[in-house]
Image (cartoon, rainbow, N blue to C red):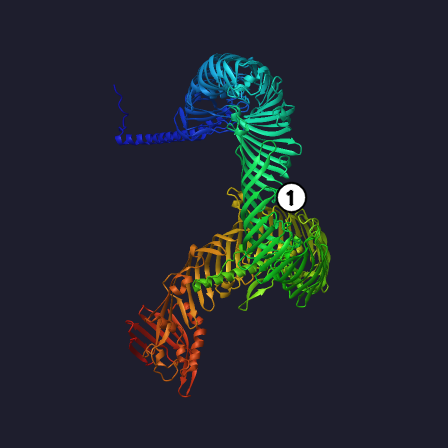
């Protein structure tokens, strides 16, 4: 039964039930949502803020190194994924790894139940670098044992790799570099166990160099790591395995397959077992000199032992088959067999270089034993085929060898070789294969058949003599690169017993010290060969010729050079050269012998052979040079041909001079091709009897004399005569040598008697007979010579005619009388007297002489010379009388007169065997210049000749160079005239700048005496005592200059002395001065000493010589004055002079400041100058300069021992003022500082070191308008560089700062670090005032590159608030040098220097030009060739042409464009405009003044009497062609002449036309008001503004006054303008006008003054 509800309780309604449900469900729902949200939020916070850091922290602690986990990319209840993560390298462990992502799996339930977080980690695409340390440990990071600390314990359950790349860096073997191994596509798994003490792992992958691997293993971490590995490899590089396992042998190349087990026990040697096969392997056994290549085979690995099975390889070029074992503990036990190898390859393998070729084939057996570190290779070598050493065949060859690899020593023993031809060779030795490599082998040969060996080297032909059996000892030793073989041999059984030595060095062979006993003498030989050629020398001494030929007696000696090919030693194949000598009595015969290709030739030279032994008709000695030829197969005289030259020392018959003859022997007679003696030649036949004693039986010769020297003719003449010229004659000589006959035609050429010349050609005949004597008669165009001699060759008669001069001689007994008339002395010479110095001589000689022909002496004579001339000296008369005493001519009185100068000579001329001339000259009122000209002393260097004659070029060789252009145009002639003027200026500059005296131009009057004696043997001796007054010395060449429009000669620095004294002597080319003294007032210069000989000495003294006189030699800087005192001592030789001295300055001052002291000393020796000086002005810091520099004087032959220089300079503080002496361009004016500089290196490449410091200094420079102040800085000199560490100063209200490096001489290389630190100069707010150039502000940064001597300037300079001044003076100063000033070639180069005209920069030339300019230029080039590039814009300004002002046209770009190729000639594009008044007709006015205010013509409304013409000037083109490119136009249109007239000003019309006042006012107003009106017009911006004077008429007073009016105009359009006119000095109304130009002929004007004066005018103008 169902219970019913309580009574009285109504049942709940549905609405009520829903309300109850909502009240319960809503809180539960809200709580659920909040719970879920909180759970999600807490999970997110836990994962990101607790779990992820917990994992990272636990991993860090687990690995004991930082672990960087990336951001959590996703998570779930059992996994996490981290982003890019890594294990970075540490300071102690270079291993590092990174992964793209990390997947971590874990069991959350296990974590909640056990509080243990087991991680299953998967590394996605990891990249790892693992490096093996020097102890062999790969991974030093150890996974810690997990400690039970913390609420949650983390444990690594598994670590997996996926697509990993691992770079292994094994520790290298000793001496090798570390080389990594890259493995890619690696997959694997690592599972720790036993609380991270045991690890099981497996991995697989491939190498980056191909090859694959699979690895399984287990590692136990105990006291030391223990690992067991199972590795399988396929096609893996052996070099990578060698680096990983470190085998005892080095595997360099090849691949291997293998399956091995590896046990690693800490530091112990790895134990490897398994098998492997390899191919194409290159391996190196330590200490063996060669590597094993191409190895292939199988290996068995068992612990420390490696077994080789049928391994094939090649050691060097030796192939072998090897079996055996290599045990890392026990060493090598290998056997190798070499079947057959070439000897060449065997030697090359062991780097053995023999000095001779070796060929053949050998086999060998070998063993390799010994420890791993010390392998030993032993074996035996035998030949399998006949061998060959050089050309010697060997039938048997064997040897034992032992190679100690650790010592790199190869020992070869039991060497045995049997030559095929017989004998035996044994030997032994050793070779060092280490550096330096060397070889030492010893051999002994016994009973070797020398004849057979000789055949081998002579193409199978036996030698001409017997050699017999030969014994030898040989040693081959030396460095491998230069092996030497030395062998001594003995051939005692030879025809000529011989001993010697053979040496071989490289490809060269030497035969040395070969000694053979031959025919009672000794023959020694030496030879050498290189390649297939040989050469040798043979020397024979004391060989008895009779043993070879009984007809030849004497001893033979000789030296021969032989050469040939090593392929044949036949006599016909040997080339021979040499010489031999046969001595017999006093005569010698020398022969030069040579043979080649089976022919021999000999050049026989005889000397001192007595001819009278062959024939009594012959005399003297026979010498000759005869060439003989023949075949080596026959030496019969009939087969011999001879040709050559012989010399007969005493000629034949009449020819007493030596005769040289070319002859031939044809087997029957001597054919004389040509026989010559001085001035003689002949040809023909000489018949000789050669049977028995040779003799000449007859002569038949054609004789010809060409250019025969007349002086050689046997004509007796006095010794004072000098006969020159040549004679040609052609004739025939017949007869016998004792009685010849001659008939010939004669031509005499260039006849000169004592320098007196005749017609160039004199022709005639000559006859000579034994009975009648000699005669000759020759004639020319006007000259004649006839001479007759008796059979004894004494003169009979003489008749000489030469122009107007005659010489007639006739014999009277033994006296031959000569009469001379008007004989010219031009070119006169006297034998024994050197007159070349006095040439040219001149004058006319007359007189008579009597000559004793027996004694050939002048008995007496009288001579007179009219108008004598000696060199440049000309006299009035010269007279002399002399007599002959024996061979001595005594001059009683000889006088020379020239104006007031008189020279008197008395003396003797001794003409005996040693001619001698002595005498005494008295001089009265002589001229010094005459003496120097006569002696041809023009330059100082001429004194070094002494009295030797100078050598001059003949006049014919001097070709004048024409400089004029008479046939050219006037313009070309003017250009040439300008070039000549420029050349004269250049010459003047050069000569003005000379500092070393050149000329010996001394002038003045002197008196005194000279005593002299001269002879050919003793030379010239003289003593002199001369006194001069007012002597001048002009040491430098004069030059032409233009003065006051006239060309004049500038003497160029003349030094004068009031008194000159010269005393001394001359002997043996030495001038001794005692003294040479110059005096003027208290000043004197004197020199005492000797000059000109082999040695020279002397002392120079200078007393109180004003230092200003030095300006004549070397221009001194600044104002230095004072008196110079000094001494210098001279010694040494002219070739190597020596000097030492000192100099002081007394009473000196520098620019008005007294110099306290100035001293210096020097010495010159061996072409080096050492000097030192100290200068002190007024401070305790003097200037000290010392140095040692090479200087070779021009006349010295000694060169400096080196080109090194050494100069030091030290000065500081106030002493820096003295630097002004050295650098006049820069002046030190105050401050403190120090300069220490040392210059080394050479004069061409000096090296400067030192420093300069400056503090608060003031420095003035010639190039700057005011000094630099407050200069501070440090500069260092480093060899070829100036390092400006810091330098700054104040200049012209601004600051200058410099810093950087600048080389002095050589530019910096491209890789020089200093190239980035050029010298930079900063200019900051400089207010520069360069007079006549620029005034205004300067800023910028300048970079100086290049060198200090050739700087290159770049950077940027900015000009602001300034004026660029254009002036004639600036242009002149910049473009033309003053006369006499040298133009130095500029060394400064601009390189991309940017010059910017910035704000408010004006280009002005007052009062004409005033432009406001803006723009920039890029400047390149040198100062003489500037190449600016850029555009300058002219923004405003005007040009004032006295009465007219042109302004820049508005709205038009005004430019001056500079182009590099045009230099400083810009291309202008400028448009200027100006308005000028024009009077068209008489004005209508109340007065007569054109400028009266009430003159209607001044108004725009006037009747056209005055109008404004607008002028436009356009310039387009180069500035240099300004006037060619100037175009003037006007509106209204006017002609060019009319425009120019208008520009000149309207005031001209008023002058002289009744109103001069107004004319003057216009003139003054135009000149004075132009600038004012231009300024106001520009300021107001109007197109036109004019100020002009005008005349104001006062009708009441009947007078006028001068007033000032102004007109303001505005251009509305090009044809419409408006103007306002106002008289500024009157109260008249202002007038306003409008002008409209319809065309050039029609104009409309209107005006009003707003006071009732209104006008309108139409103007029509027609111009004709």
Q: State whether residue 1072 appears in this view.
A: no
Q: Judge by depth and name the residue closer to the eye, 1300 or 1020.
A: 1020
Q: Judge by depth and name the residue closer to the eye, 1282 or 1436.
A: 1282
Where residue 1158 appears, x then y in whole percent?
70, 56
Q: State whether residue 721 appears in this view.
A: yes
Q: Residue furthest right?
A: 1074
Instruction: Kindly indicate the quadrant of the structure image that contains residue 654.
Output: top right
Left or right: 1026, with 557 as reference point: right
Q: Judge by depth and name the residue closer to the eye, 980 or 450.
A: 450
Where residue 1283 appears, x then y in whole percent?
58, 48
Left or right: 584, with 1503 as reference point: right
Instruction: Kindly indicate the quadrant of the structure image that contains residue 513.
Output: top right
Compared to 12, does 845 lie above or below? Answer: below
Left or right: 126, with 1660 as reference point: right
Where residue 1293 appears, x then y in whole percent?
55, 59
Q: How many marks?
A: 1
Left or right: 1038, with 153 as reference point: right
Instruction: Kindly indicate the quadrant of the structure image that contains residue 921.
Output: bottom right
Category of crowding for the residue at label 1, using alpha-carbon neighbours closer than 10 angstroms: few (below 14), some (14–19), many (at least 20) = few
In the rendered image, the quadrant that contains the N terminus is top left
User: Which residue is the site of mark 1?
Assistant: 1201
Compared to 733, does 306 lie above or below? Answer: above
Q: Residue furthest left?
A: 1
> Of helix, strand and loop, which one carries label 1?
loop
Q: Judge by depth and name the residue closer to the eye, 1444 or 423.
A: 423
In the rendered image, the quadrant that contains the C terminus is bottom left
Q: Residue furthest front?
A: 771
Where residue 536 appears, x then y in whole percent?
57, 27
Compared to 168, does 1339 lie above or below? Answer: below
């Amino acid at each position: 039964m169902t219970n019913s509800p309580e009574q009285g309780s109504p049942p709940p309604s549905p609405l009520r039930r829903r309300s109850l449900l909502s009240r319960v469900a809503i809180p539960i729902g809200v709580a659920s949502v909040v719970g879920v949200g909180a759970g999600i939020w807490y999970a997110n916070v836990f994962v990101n803020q607790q779990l992820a850091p917990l994992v990272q922290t636990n991993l860090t602690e687990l690995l004991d190194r930082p672990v960087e986990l990336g951001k959590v990319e996703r998570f779930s209840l059992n996994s996490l994924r981290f982003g890019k993560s890594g294990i970075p390298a540490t300071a102690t462990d270079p291993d590092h790894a990174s992964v793209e992502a990390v997947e971590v799996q874990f069991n959350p339930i296990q974590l909640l139940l056990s509080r243990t977080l087991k991680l299953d980690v998967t590394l996605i695409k990891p990249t790892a670098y693992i490096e093996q340390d020097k102890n062999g440990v790969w991974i030093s990071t150890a996974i810690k044992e997990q400690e039970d600390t913390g609420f949650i314990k983390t444990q690594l359950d598994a670590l997996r790799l996926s697509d990993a790349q691992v770079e292994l860096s094994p520790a290298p073997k000793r001496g090798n570099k570390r080389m990594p191994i890259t493995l890619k596509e690696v997959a694997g798994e690592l599972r720790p166990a036993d609380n991270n003490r045991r690890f099981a792992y497996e991995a697989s992958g491939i190498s980056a160099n191909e090859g694959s691997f699979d690895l399984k293993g287990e590692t136990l971490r105990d006291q030391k790591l223990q690992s067991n590995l199972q590795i399988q490899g396929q096609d893996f590089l052996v070099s990578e395995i060698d680096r990983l396992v470190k085998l005892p042998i080095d595997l360099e190349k090849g691949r291997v397959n293998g399956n091995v087990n590896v046990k690693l026990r800490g530091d112990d040697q790895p134990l490897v077992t398994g098998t492997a096969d390899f191919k194409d392997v290159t391996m190196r056994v330590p200490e063996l000199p060669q590597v094993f290549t191409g190895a292939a085979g199988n290996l068995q690995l068992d612990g420390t032992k490696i077994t080789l099975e049928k391994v094939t390889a090649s050691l060097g070029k030796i192939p072998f088959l090897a079996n055996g074992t290599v045990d890392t503990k026990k060493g090598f036990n290998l056997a190798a067999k070499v079947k057959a190898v070439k000897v060449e390859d065997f030697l090359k393998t062991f780097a053995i270089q023999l000095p001779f070729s070796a060929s053949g084939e050998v086999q060998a057996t070998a063993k390799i034993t010994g420890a791993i570190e010390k392998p030993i290779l032993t074996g035996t070598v035998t030949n399998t085929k006949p061998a060959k050493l050089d050309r010697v065949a060997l039938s048997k060859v064997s040897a034992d060898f032992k190679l100690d690899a650790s010592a790199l020593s190869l020992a070869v023993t039991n060497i045995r070789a049997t030559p095929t031809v017989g004998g035996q060779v044994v030997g032994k030795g050793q070779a060092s294969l280490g550096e330096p490599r060397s070889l030492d082998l010893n051999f002994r040969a016994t009973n070797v058949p020398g004849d057979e060996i000789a055949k081998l080297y002579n193409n199978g032909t036996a030698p001409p003599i017997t050699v017999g059996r030969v014994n030898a000892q040989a040693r081959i030793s030396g460095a491998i690169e230069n092996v030497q073989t030395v062998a001594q041999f003995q051939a005692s059984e030879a025809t000529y017993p011989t001993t010697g030595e053979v040496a071989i060095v490289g490809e060269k062979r030497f035969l040395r010290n070969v000694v053979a006993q031959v025919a009672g003498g000794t023959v020694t030989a030496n030879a050498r060969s290189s390649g297939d050629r040989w050469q040798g020398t043979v020397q024979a001494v004391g060989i008895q010729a009779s043993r070879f030929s009984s007809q030849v007696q004497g001893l033979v000696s000789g030296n021969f050079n032989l050469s040939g090919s090593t392929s044949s030693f036949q006599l016909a194949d040997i080339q021979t050269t040499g010489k031999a000598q046969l001595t017999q009595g006093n005569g010698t015969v020398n022969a030069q012998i040579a043979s080649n290709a089976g022919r021999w030739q000999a050049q026989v030279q005889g000397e001192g052979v007595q001819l009278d032994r062959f024939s009594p008709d012959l005399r003297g000695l026979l010498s000759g040079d005869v060439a003989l030829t023949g075949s080596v197969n026959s030496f019969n005289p009939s087969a011999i041909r001879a040709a050559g030259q012989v010399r007969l020392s005493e000629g034949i018959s009449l020819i007493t001079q030596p005769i040289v003859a070319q002859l031939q022997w044809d087997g029957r007679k001597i054919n004389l091709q040509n026989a010559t003696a001085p001035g003689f030649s002949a040809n023909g036949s000489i018949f000789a009897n050669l049977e028995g004693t040779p003799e000449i039986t007859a002569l038949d010769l054609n004789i010809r004399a060409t250019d025969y020297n007349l002086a050689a003719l046997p004509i007796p003449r006095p010794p004072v005569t000098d006969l020159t010229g040549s004679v040609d004659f052609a004739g025939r000589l017949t007869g016998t040598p004792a009685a010849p006959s001659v008939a010939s035609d004669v031509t005499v050429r260039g006849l000169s008697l004592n320098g007196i010349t005749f017609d160039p050609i004199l022709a005639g005949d000559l006859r000579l007979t034994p009975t009648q004597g000699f005669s000759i008669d020759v004639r020319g165009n006007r000259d004649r010579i006839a001479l007759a001699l008796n059979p004894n060759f004494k003169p009979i008669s003489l008749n000489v005619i030469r122009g107007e001069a005659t010489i007639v001689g006739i014999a009277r007994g033994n006296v031959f009388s000569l009469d001379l008339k008007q004989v010219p002395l031009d070119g006169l010479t006297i034998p024994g007297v050197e007159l070349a110095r006095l040439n040219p001589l001149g004058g006319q000689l007359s007189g008579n002489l009597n000559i004793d022909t027996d004694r050939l002496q002048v008995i007496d004579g009288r001579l007179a010379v009219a108008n004598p001339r000696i060199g440049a000296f000309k006299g009035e008369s010269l007279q002399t009388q002399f007599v002959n005493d024996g061979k001595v001519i005594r001059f009683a009185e000889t006088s020379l007169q020239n104006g007031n100068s008189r020279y008197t000579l008395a003396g003797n001329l001794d003409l005996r065997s040693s001619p001698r001339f002595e005498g005494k000259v008295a001089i009265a009122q002589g001229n010094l210049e005459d003496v120097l000209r006569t002696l041809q002393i023009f330059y100082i260097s001429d004194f070094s000749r002494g009295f030797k004659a100078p050598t001059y070029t003949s006049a014919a060789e001097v070709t004048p160079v024409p400089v004029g252009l008479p046939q050219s145009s006037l313009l070309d002639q003017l250009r040439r005239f300008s070039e000549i003027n420029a050349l004269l200026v250049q010459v003047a500059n050069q000569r003005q700048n000379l500092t070393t005296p050149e000329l010996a131009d001394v002038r003045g009057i002197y008196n005194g005496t000279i005593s002299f004696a001269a002879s050919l043997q003793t030379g010239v001796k003289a003593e002199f005592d001369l006194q001069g007054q007012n002597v001048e010395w002009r040491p430098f060449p004069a030059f032409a200059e233009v003065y006051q429009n006239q060309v004049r000669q500038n003497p160029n620095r003349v030094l004068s002395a009031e008194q000159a004294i010269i005393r001394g002597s001359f002997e043996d080319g030495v001038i001794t001065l005692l003294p040479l003294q110059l005096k003027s007032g208290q000043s004197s210069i004197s020199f005492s000493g000797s000059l000109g000989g082999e040695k020279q000495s002397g002392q120079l003294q200078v007393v109180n010589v004003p230092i200003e006189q030095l300006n004549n030699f070397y221009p001194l800087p600044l104002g230095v004055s004072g008196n110079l005192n000094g001494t210098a001592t001279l010694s040494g030789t002219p070739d190597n002079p020596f000097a030492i001295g000192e100099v002081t300055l007394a009473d000196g001052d520098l620019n008005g400041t007294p110099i306290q002291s100035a001293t210096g000393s020097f010495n010159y020796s061996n072409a080096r100058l050492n000097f030192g000086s100290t200068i002190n002005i007024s401070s305790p810091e003097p200037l000290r300069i010392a140095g040692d520099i090479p200087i070779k004087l021009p006349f010295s032959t000694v060169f400096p021992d080196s080109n090194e220089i050494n100069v030091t300079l030290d000065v500081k503080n106030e002493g820096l003022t003295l630097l002004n002496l050295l650098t006049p361009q820069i002046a030190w004016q105050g401050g403190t500082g120090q300069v220490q500089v040392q210059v080394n290196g050479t004069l061409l490449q000096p090296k400067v070191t030192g420093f300069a410091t400056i503090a608060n200094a003031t420095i003035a420079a010639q190039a700057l308008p005011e000094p630099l102040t407050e200069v501070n800085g440090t500069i260092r000199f480093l060899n070829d560089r100036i390092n400006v560490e810091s330098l700054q100063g104040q200049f012209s209200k601004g600051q200058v700062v410099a810093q950087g490096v600048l080389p002095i001489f050589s530019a910096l290389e491209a890789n020089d670090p200093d190239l980035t630190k050029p010298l930079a100069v900063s200019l900051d707010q400089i207010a520069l005032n360069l007079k006549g150039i620029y005034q205004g502000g300067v800023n910028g940064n300048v970079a100086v590159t290049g060198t200090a001597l050739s700087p290159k300037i770049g950077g940027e300079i900015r000009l602001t608030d300034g004026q660029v001044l254009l002036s004639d003076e600036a242009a002149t100063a910049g473009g033309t040098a003053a006369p006499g000033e040298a133009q130095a070639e500029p060394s400064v180069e601009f390189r991309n220097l940017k010059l910017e005209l910035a704000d408010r920069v004006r280009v002005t030339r007052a009062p004409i030009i005033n432009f406001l300019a803006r723009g920039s230029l890029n400047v390149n080039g040198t100062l003489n060739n500037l190449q600016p590039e850029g555009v300058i814009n002219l923004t405003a300004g005007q040009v004032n042409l006295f009465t007219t002002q042109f302004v820049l046209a508005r709205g038009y770009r005004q430019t001056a464009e500079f182009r590099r190729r045009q230099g400083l000639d810009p291309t202008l594009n400028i448009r200027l405009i100006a308005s000028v008044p024009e009077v068209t007709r008489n004005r209508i006015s109340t007065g007569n003044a054109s400028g009266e205010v009430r003159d209607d013509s001044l108004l725009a409304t006037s009747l056209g009497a005055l109008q404004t013409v607008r002028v436009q000037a356009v310039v387009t083109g180069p500035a240099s062609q300004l006037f060619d490119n100037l175009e003037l136009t006007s509106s209204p249109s006017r002609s060019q002449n009319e425009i120019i007239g208008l520009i000149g000003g309207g005031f001209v019309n008023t002058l002289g036309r009744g109103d001069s006042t107004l004319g003057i006012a216009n003139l003054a107003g135009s000149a004075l008001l132009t600038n004012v009106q231009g300024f106001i017009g520009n300021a107001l911006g109007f197109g036109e503004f004019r100020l002009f004077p005008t005349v104001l008429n006062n009708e009441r007073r009947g007078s006028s006054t001068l007033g000032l009016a102004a007109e303001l105009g505005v251009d509305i359009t090009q044809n419409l303008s408006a103007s306002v006119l106002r008289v500024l000095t009157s109260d008249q109304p202002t007038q306003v006008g409008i002008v409209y130009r319809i065309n050039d002929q029609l104009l409309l004007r209107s005006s009003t003054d707003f006071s009732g004066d209104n006008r309108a005018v139409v103007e029509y103008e027609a111009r004709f």
